[in-house]
């Protein structure tokens, strides 16, 4: 079952071919993890969505409060008998249909879909995880690149490239040839007692999990965090590389080309993340 504008419908319900999210990618989305019926980091998701809607010049309905959308998500979980389970939630907000590139209106609709997950906690995957650079296309370092929109062509093509080349993931470059993120999450680089992550100004996604991990690092007395551009040459000099997203938490990279990495800092941060999740 899905939630379409507040109405619970069968999950095979069709949308109009004129839906602007489908026709123009004129839509935003949030992927939210639910652990034992609890929405994790919901406030961060909500305020990112509101900020993104303003940037996209979408009208924010008066009823789009944090409580209203949380209730709509919970209604969807209940309709799928998942109200106490571990779930992946996808909330999509689209501009209402009408117009071509120039919309006839800025009012919005939304839909919510859910899928079960196996675990409430974040587990570090220590299997081989090999990445390389994806250099066929580049990300423009603009504010729009930091948003979770339906315009994800580079992520789709990059994922196909990774599969064709026996890779687990790829790292994306911006037009200045700086490494900005992975196909499915933000990137962190560990070298000695410093940790680097690309700044939003480089065009990386404003990830909710990125924010959580940065907060944990800020409180570590033995590590120093820098939001700074990362060149491809730095990757092979690093001690660790890891990717963060809201569903996986932290994914350590084991190999980039001939370089093999450790994962000690990733383990420490994952323990802090799971402690935070248990306390919320």
Image (cartoon, rainbow, N blue to C red):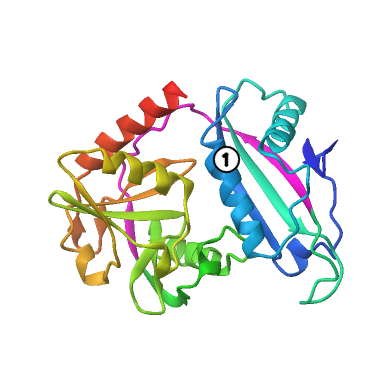
**Quadrant of residue 69 within the rendered picture:** top right
For residue 237, side relative to residue 88 (left or right): left
Q: Residue at x 32, y 35 (%)?
A: 270
What span is colored magenta in the figure?
109-132
Location of residue 171 in the rendering, given as x and y in whole percent from the top left corner = 38, 64
**Quadrant of residue 8 within the rendered picture:** top right
- Number of numbered discs visible in the structure rendering: 1
Q: Is residue 166 visible?
A: no
**Quadrant of residue 63 within the rendered picture:** top right
For residue 106, side relative to residue 252 (left or right): right
Residue 265 within the segment the image draws in magenta? no
Q: Is residue 86 above or below residue 241?
A: above
Q: Quadrant of the N terminus?
A: top right
Frontmost residue, 164 versus 162: 162
Location of residue 118 in the rendering, given as x and y in whole percent from the top left corner = 52, 29
Identify the residue position indicated by label 1 in the image: 32
Location of residue 152 in the rendering, given as x and y in whole percent from the top left corner = 58, 64
Residue 126 within the segment the image draws in magenta? yes
Secondary structure under badge 1? strand
Q: Is residue 191 above or below residue 174?
A: above
In the image, farthest residue toward the front: 62
Q: Residue at x 69, y 60 (%)?
A: 27
For residue 65, side relative to residue 228 (left or right): right
Q: Residue at x 73, y 44 (%)?
A: 64
For residue 107, side relative to residue 164 (left or right): right
Q: Is residue 179 visible?
A: yes
Q: Residue at x 70, y 34 (%)?
A: 73
Q: Residues within 10 Å of mark 1 (few under 14, many from 20)?
A: many
């Amino acid at each position: 079952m899905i939630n379409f504008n507040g109405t619970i419908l069968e999950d095979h319900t069709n949308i109009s071919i004129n839906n602007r999210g489908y026709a123009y990618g004129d839509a935003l989305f949030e992927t939210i993890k639910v652990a034992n019926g609890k929405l994790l980091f919901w406030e961060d998701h909500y305020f990112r969505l509101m900020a993104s809607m303003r940037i996209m010049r979408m009208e924010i309905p008066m009823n789009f409060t944090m409580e209203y959308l949380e209730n709509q998500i919970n209604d969807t979980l209940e309709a799928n008998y998942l109200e106490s389970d571990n779930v992946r939630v996808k909330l999509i907000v689209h501009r209402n249909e009408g117009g071509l590139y120039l919309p006839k209106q800025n009012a919005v609709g939304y839909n919510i879909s859910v899928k079960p997950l196996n675990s409430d906690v974040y587990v570090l995957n220590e299997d081989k995880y090999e990445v390389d650079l994806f250099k066929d296309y580049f990300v423009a370092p603009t504010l729009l690149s930091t948003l979770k929109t339906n315009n994800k062509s580079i992520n789709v093509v990059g994922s196909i490239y990774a599969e064709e080349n026996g890779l687990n993931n790829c790292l994306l470059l911006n037009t200045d040839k700086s490494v900005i993120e992975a196909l499915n999450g933000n990137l962190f680089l560990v070298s000695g007692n410093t940790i680097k992550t690309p700044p939003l100004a480089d065009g990386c996604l404003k990830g909710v999990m990125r924010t959580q991990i940065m907060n944990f690092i800020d409180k570590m007395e033995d590590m120093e965090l820098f939001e700074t551009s990362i060149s491809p040459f730095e990757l092979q000099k690093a001690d660790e590389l890891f990717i963060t997203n809201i569903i996986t938490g932290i994914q350590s990279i084991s190999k980039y080309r001939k370089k093999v990495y450790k994962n000690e800092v990733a383990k420490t941060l994952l323990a802090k993340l799971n402690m935070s999740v248990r306390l919320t």
